[in-house]
Amino acid sequence: MAVRRDLREYLLEAEFTVRQGEIMVLIGENGSGKSSLLHLIAGLLPPGSGHVKIGEQVLYDSMNGIHVPPEYREIGLVFQNHAVFPHLTVFENIAFGLRRRKVPEPEIRERVGEILARVSLENLSGVRGDQLSGGERQRTALARALVISPTLLLLDEPVSALDAVAQERMRSYLHTYVKTSNIPCIVVTHSFRDAASLGDQVGVMERGRIIQNGDLEEIRGNGSHFLHQFFCGCRKDSCHL
Amino acid sequence: MMGRRYFQGKNSLFLTIGAGVLITLLVVFIITPILGLFFRITFEQFLASLSDLVVWNALILSLVTASISTLVIILVGTPVAWINARHQYPGREIVDTLIDLPLVLPPTVAGLALLLAFGRMGLIGSIFYDYGISIAFTTLAVIIAQIFVSIPFYIRQARASFEQLDPMYEHAAKSLGSPAVPTFFTVILPLVKAGLIGGAIMSFARALGEFGATIMFAGNFQGRTQTMPLAIYTAMQGDLTAAITLSVILIIISFLIIALVKFKLRGYTER
């Protein structure tokens, strides 16, 4: 995919490929354009120019005037703020996408039940979205994005609200999910653990551009302040390591 | 240190007394005229006036017309408020200002303007009159006058509710495969319903109390255009007890409406 769009302060311009079954982790400072890039791919923010392709399916192509609306893109997106519908129960939140696809009711119950167990939310299926804790909302949002069997998965800080043990469990589940369903996945994160355990490739974003792209070891060599802090956890100028 | 604490305590005492005096004055100011009405008639007189046909005609006409007006306002106002809250188009600010205009327009001016627009010789009324349809001085005119003066209350509240709603919920619904219209009904409306209900009830209350525009545009005909406020005005000329009875009924209905709004809104926010 290659997209280009004027944001408030800079031009977002990114070109990269994520293969089937591969996880690309995007890191970068706040405001570097990571979340905007996910929204551009999902079709929630129209790009100014470029193209977005998943396999053979063209979702956006400014040259040929193709723009598939977000509701027809079959992309699973987990928002940074989760966006769990507060007026619906956990079950109804997860079933939302299946109902829009007119999936038969018994199949909805089966698929939602299955994913509820996967994300350990079986006991909360009848609880409204506005009654959930941050971690429960995050798991609901993740389950809601996965249950529709997306052709591309976009995750904006998918495990940040979970405790350390739950984070590890969720990373492992996500890794297995992407590999077994063989879909491309892009994860935006500020966490080194996410990048280390999920990322097949890591892209570093700065002011709307991917300035470096490769595996974790490749980008570790870059001497920027941000990357030093990302890997080491401390400021470069006061680091004793 | 002690001195500072002493002054803080003294300030707090003055503030408490000041606030108490202000609130008492306001409550007395609002409640005295209302109590005045209640004390001017006996319960027997009140019951006797209730058997008066004028009272029932006015009460039923007021409730029916205000309900129809509110329904029309919701059906027209909701999409307009949504569009103005979420979409940019040329002249949006002018449309917004025009919607607010009836709020500042004296009702008699509104009535006169409606008469000149929808009357027999009016800009729109003359077209209808050519087809044998007369709008002015009919029950339809009462409804039009009520819609005209009370629609800004609903649209302002609805627009504010839509603007406060985080767009991420719409984005989430879209990303899950929900097109715009189902998203509006299944996600957006349920999330803003407290605001919309509040706006609708305020519009209903305004329509119920409408006087100036109605008397100018619809006239004052018992059973056809004589709503509660008009019946009170008419009764004042001869039968003060009937006027007080009508006023008391209107106060009770208004109080119930406001109480209902507060109860409903609290219910939605606590849920």
Image (spheres, coloured by chain):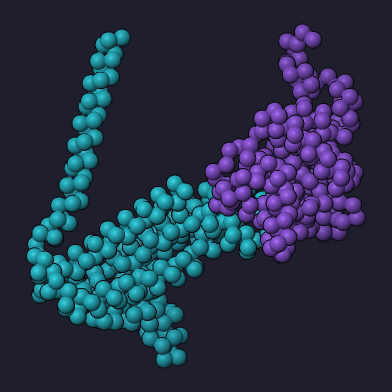
Chain colours: A purple, B cyan
In the displayed structure, would residue B213 be above or below residue A45? below
In the displayed structure, would residue B254 be above or below residue B169? below
Q: Nearer the viewer, residue A115 or A68?
A: A115
* Residue A227 percent coordinates (x, y): 79, 23
Image-quadrant location for residue A132:
top right
In this rendering, the count of numbered labels is: 0
| Residue A32 seen by the camera | no
- Quadrant of image for the N terminus of chain B: top left
Left or right of B158, for residue A139? right
Instruction: Identify the residue shown where x is 55% and y is 52%.
Output: A87
Image-quadrant location for residue B215:
bottom left
Q: Nearer the viewer, residue B156 or A184?
A: A184
* Residue A142 percent coordinates (x, y): 71, 44
Left or right of B110, for residue B55? left
* Residue B79 percent coordinates (x, y): 54, 63
Left or right of B257, for residue A234? right
| Residue B137 seen by the camera | yes
Instruction: Identify the residue shown where x is 73% and y is 15%.
Output: A235
Q: Nearer the viewer, residue B214 or B43?
A: B43
In the displayed structure, would residue B230 be above or below residue B206? below
Instruction: Identify the residue shown where x is 57% and y is 48%.
Output: A127
Instruction: Identify the residue shown where x is 9% and y is 70%.
Output: B45
* Residue A144 percent coordinates (x, y): 69, 49
Left or right of A49, for residue B154? left
